Amino acid sequence: MTSIPILKERESQIWQKGETPFSITCDKHSLAGAISQRACVFCGSRVVLYPIADAVHLVHGPIGCAAYTWDIRGALSSGPELHRLSFSTDLQERDVIFGGEKKLAAVLGELIDRHRPKAAFVYSTCIVGIIGDDVAAVCRKVEREKGIPVLPVHSEGFKGTKKDGYKAACDALFRIIGTGPINDISPQSINILGEFNIGGEAWIIRKYYERMGVQVVSVMTGDGRVDEIRRAHGAALNVVQCSGSMTQLAQMMEEKYGIPHIRVSYFGIEDMSKALYDVAERFPDNPEIMARTREMVREEIAAIRPELAEFRKDLEGKKAAIYVGGAFKAFSLIKALRHLGMRVILAGSQTGNDEDYEMLRDLCDDGTVIVDDANPLELSKYIIEKDADLVIGGVKERPIAYKMGVGFCDHNHERKIPLAGYVGMRNFAEEVHRSVSSPVWRFAPRRGAKLEKTEVTPC
């Protein structure tokens, strides 16, 4: 097969370990025409804020923007489900010409009166940035009239990358943090940042910490509540899971409220255990927290180890390609796959920075390709050339994997089962095993399958 070429302008964002000195470019806009897998600024802000379940989320722009991001996180709620409703000002040609501020104010007022939310988030889209609507002024006016926080999210899609959307979301959240009571918060307390409860993970993680004796003040933003976020400044520690989306908020809270933060991952046995131990170590005045943590970790690992050993028998030596949103998740996935006897041949992310890629370099084996902001052409190239048995990614990578005749594991917004925590590691191993071991892949032409001709007997 002829080798698939790489666009020359993209060469600096791809590096293969062992061939040349380490050098990779990141934190830049996607190459025009390359059909990046990365989302826009608006989408970045929407996926962070969307799981706040008792707030109205209003997209100020054409209806297509709201349709594109409706239910994009799939975030589960233990109570209200206002976030599952998709609202838009549905800007038309007349609004573009004469401005959409009056329409925005009217829609906001009607939504607040009808649904009685705890807060409202208003997302600016590309067209709003072009026509110059003063969204912040409209939000201030409606906030005074209705008596709830009405928060502009400056997320015009054209002005940067998905990471700029994360920043816009953090700015909006920071406006309401510090406005709630903190009198009943324990000295042994945390906020969980960057956990979005896609498959119920926030509930699993919260229970771990509660078993340790640590109070969880708020989760930002999975199964989130406005009142919990408003009192997040009373926690003793911020625990940042999705570092790309929430590190900026943790830094802002540290600067204003003096709350330290640590970076963790809840995927895989090693990183899940480390996340619990790292929190326990932050409360040395309560040694019973560490004692409970050690006992819990032993119990949880013992419960899943036999099944993982069985899965490993079939997965030993298989090869996986990873392409995810944040690079920190890729670190955990590499470790988790090694527990299953698998080797990573490609590791990439949409929003990784220089430090992330240096850590990936140290973690990956020789021959592994590291890629920033990949496109379908590049993913297809390395899936074929490295003969991958599995692709781990999101909804946009799924068709690429299936067209290449490769197993797929959804580790992004659209999955329905939890993959975090110890039970999540067991679920992950089972999904990988089922996908890689499926007999359907022997029919893929790329695998060299030769189907026998079958005679069809007329009825």
Image (cartoon, rainbow, N blue to C red):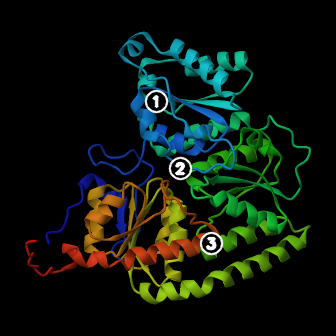
Earlier in the chain: of badge 3 and badge 1, it is: 1
Residue type of the residue flagged with mark 1 = Thr
Label 2: state its secondary structure. Answer: loop
Crowding around mark 2 (Cα neighbors within 10 Å: few <14, some 14 to 19, many 20+) is: many
Crowding around mark 1 (Cα neighbors within 10 Å: few <14, some 14 to 19, many 20+) is: many
Res 297 → quadrant: bottom right
**Alpha carbon of mark 3 to alpha carbon of mark 1: how far?**
39 Å
Q: Residue at x 30, y 69 (%)?
A: 383
**Alpha carbon of mark 2 to alpha carbon of mark 3: how far?**
20 Å
Earlier in the chain: of badge 2 and badge 1, it is: 2
Label 3: state its secondary structure. Answer: helix
Crowding around mark 3 (Cα neighbors within 10 Å: few <14, some 14 to 19, many 20+) is: some
Where's residue 186, x and y in %? 89, 54
Q: Is residue 451 visible?
A: yes
The label number, if any, that marks residue 125 in the structure image: 1
Res 91 → quadrant: top left
- Depth check, front residue: 194 or 196: 196
Q: Give the residue number, with chain letter if any, for mark 2.
A: 74
The answer to whether residue 7 is above or below residue 127 is: below
Tell me the mark number nearer the camera, choosing from 2 and 1.
2
Q: Give the residue number, with chain letter if any, for mark 3.
A: 423
Residue type of the residue flagged with mark 2 = Gly
Kindly check if marks 2 and 3 are in contact, taking CB atoms under 8 A apart as contact: no
Label 1: state its secondary structure. Answer: loop
The answer to whether residue 66 is above or below residue 229 is: above
